[in-house]
Image (spheres, rainbow, N blue to C red):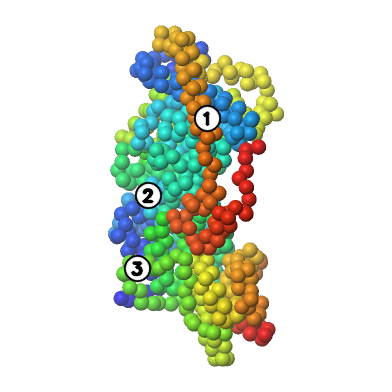
Amino acid sequence: MTDITLVEAVNLALMHEMARDPDMVVLGQDIGINGGVFRATVGLLEKYGEERVLDTPLAENMIVGAAVGMAAQGLHPVAEIQFMGFIYPTIDQMVSHASRLRNRTRGRITCPMVLRAPYGGGIHAPEHHSESTEAMFAHIPGLRVVIPSSPTRAYGLLLAAIRNPDPVVFLEPKRVYRLMKQAVEDNGEALPLDTCFVLRPGSDITLVSWGAMLHETLQAAEQLADEGIDAEVIDLATIKPIDMQTILESVGRTGRCVIVQEAARTCSVSAEIAARLAEEGLMSLFAPIRRVTGFDTVMPMFRLEGHYMPSTERILSAVRQTMEFA
Amino acid sequence: MNQAITFNIESHRFLGPDGQPEGNLPPLAEDRDALHALYRNMVLTRLYDERAIALQRTGQIGTFASSLGQEAIGAGVGHAMRPEDIIIPSFRENGALLFRHFRIRDLLLYWGGDERGMANPELGDDFPICVPISTHTTQAAGVAFAVKYRKQPRVVVCLLGDGGTSKGDFYEAINLAGMWHLPLVFVINNNQWAISVPRAIQTRSETLAQKAIAAGIPGLQIDGNDALAVRHFVAEAIETARNGGGPTVIEALSYRLCHHTTADDATRYRSDEELQAHWKLEPVARLKRFMMNADMWSESQEDELIRACKEEIEQEVRHYLDSEPPKPTSMFDSLYAELPGELRDQRRLVESGVAGKESNND
């Protein structure tokens, strides 16, 4: 067992499942000989050949449309879109077809596919490469949306996504693709797709986040500990469905909650969590729920992205305000 | 200057508008059973369309798309396919669907606003009706990849309209079909109208078939009102695909004698003179005249066929009208393989009956 990065864990899961499942194919742009622009599919072509590792023509909508057709036949396609900013042509397929094929045939035809894409800012990439628009997919009935935050969870959640009988959007936080290494055992064990992960237990305040922002959120929790504030940190992991039970249980104990996300604020996943806390957990709250988010602006090009992305300082400030409220 | 590439598009038909043969006929022209099957399907389709429109006008189904005037395309495609082949339809291929395992009761359920219409397990791998334009074309490529990947001797047939060929989806799909050499046949029902937009302002391309050339695959044009031509050339393309010969695009020229759907009024945008001129080219009378001239059909057979079709349709209509209403909770029950916990509360609300009432088709 060696220490590997998040992107290597993605690769490990793909390799594992290709060996186990002859119905699995991977398709996308530059995923073959190039191994993907982030190298997530490196080695797959050499091992599994052109029949199962498909470099496609350059058309995102077509990649996902073809994946829908493959999945309808019972294959398990894993389609890669190079960046979240290029995923929008696929929304027609995901919303109008992938998400509802099972429903509109009452289960006769299903769509066991995975749509993978790196997302989020912070790597000084060109325009259109840095967005966090997970809420668009989270809004769509029939889809699942999954965001790993570490190598171990990337491995286990991706295996679960590929094995899931319904379409899963699997968004990879590219800022942390190579930020940390973890020991990941290639044991083929999938993680649940409807459960949060408590990364740090605490009793004073609940911090909920997902993807790359957990890095800053955990840093904030460490600093808060020095100040005598014991923060619980929850990795949401599955954006849809949301495991509210774990969050409600935590907030029931702490009475305070700050939600941290990179995405723009309005109609976002943090808004959904806050609404459900208000609906189901209001009486356990000592202070208003606060959100630390990206702004409702266009994701700026990289000279300003540092001002856009929630910083550890912004998280600390929100936590202190929440703690001081009552 | 060198000529980089030249191309030509063949256009085929066997029967003229009056049912008279033009040139050599294929063996199909002497196959009485095949002709009767084609003709029966066309008559059934026309009577079904008529009945469905009456059901819509009396509030018993919702918006309905007729295939009036285009029956030869559905019939020819449906008859050319083998049972194990896979159809990926749009929404105007009623005859083709009736040649598969779609029953009239299923189609009425669907247009009556009920997902169960596409649920019949006997439909196998055939796709449900696709309402968004051309989004099914790339899926057809995926399905064709899957049968090729599994080395199955099956062919995928994807139907679309003339308007659908303007969408990027179609170009992307034929490009992939060509690149991957897929067992896939696209049949374009060029009925000259995309709701109110005529073929003339859909594209400057002289034919829709020639779009295939850009994807590196064969494209041809046929008279879509000649059931013999549709059956013959679609079958040829299907068998080519089955034998590893790759995809084909077939443009079937027809004319939409009906409104776009029951929600449309075509008198707003096209003249009665044009409509009447195209009635002279329609496919059902054409095949009937051919068979009558060849002593393969009689007026008494015609009467018997119409009676039998009407009886079948009425039986199916009764099945539809007598079907149990859908369970309100069924909107949850095929959404996921397993309903996520957060949806169980919503389902319970519907189950309790306080969420609302079923809407009818008024």
Depth check, front residue: B66 or A248: A248
Chain name for mark 3:
A
Tag 3 near tag 2, CB within 8 Å: no
Same chain under badges 3 and 2? The reply is yes
Q: Nearer the viewer, mark 3 or mark 1?
A: 1
Distance of label 2 from label 1 (alpha carbons): 34 Å
In the picture, the disc for residue A99 is none
Depth check, front residue: A305 or B40: B40
Q: Nearer the viewer, mark 2 or mark 1?
A: 1
Task: Report the residue marked by disc 3.
Answer: A189
Same chain under badges 3 and 1? The reply is no
Rendered residue at 40%/63% (across/down): A160
Rendered residue at 45%/24% (across/down): B41
Q: Amino acid at mark 3?
A: Glu
Task: Report the residue marked by disc 1.
Answer: B317
Tag 2 near tag 1, CB within 8 Å: no
Q: Assign a secondary structure to mark 1.
A: helix
Residue A60 in the image: state x and y as whole percent. 49, 52
Which of the two labelled residues, at mark 3 and mark 2, occupies the earlier sequence position?
2
Depth check, front residue: A292 or A174: A292
Q: Amino acid at mark 2?
A: Gly
Q: Label 1 crowding class (10 Å Cα cut-off): few <14, some 14-19, many 20+?
A: many
Residue A171 in the image: state x and y as whole percent. 48, 64
Q: Which quarter shows the C terminus of chain A?
A: bottom right
Q: Assign a secondary structure to mark 3.
A: loop
Task: Report the residue marked by disc 2.
Answer: A74
Distance of label 3 from label 2 (alpha carbons): 22 Å
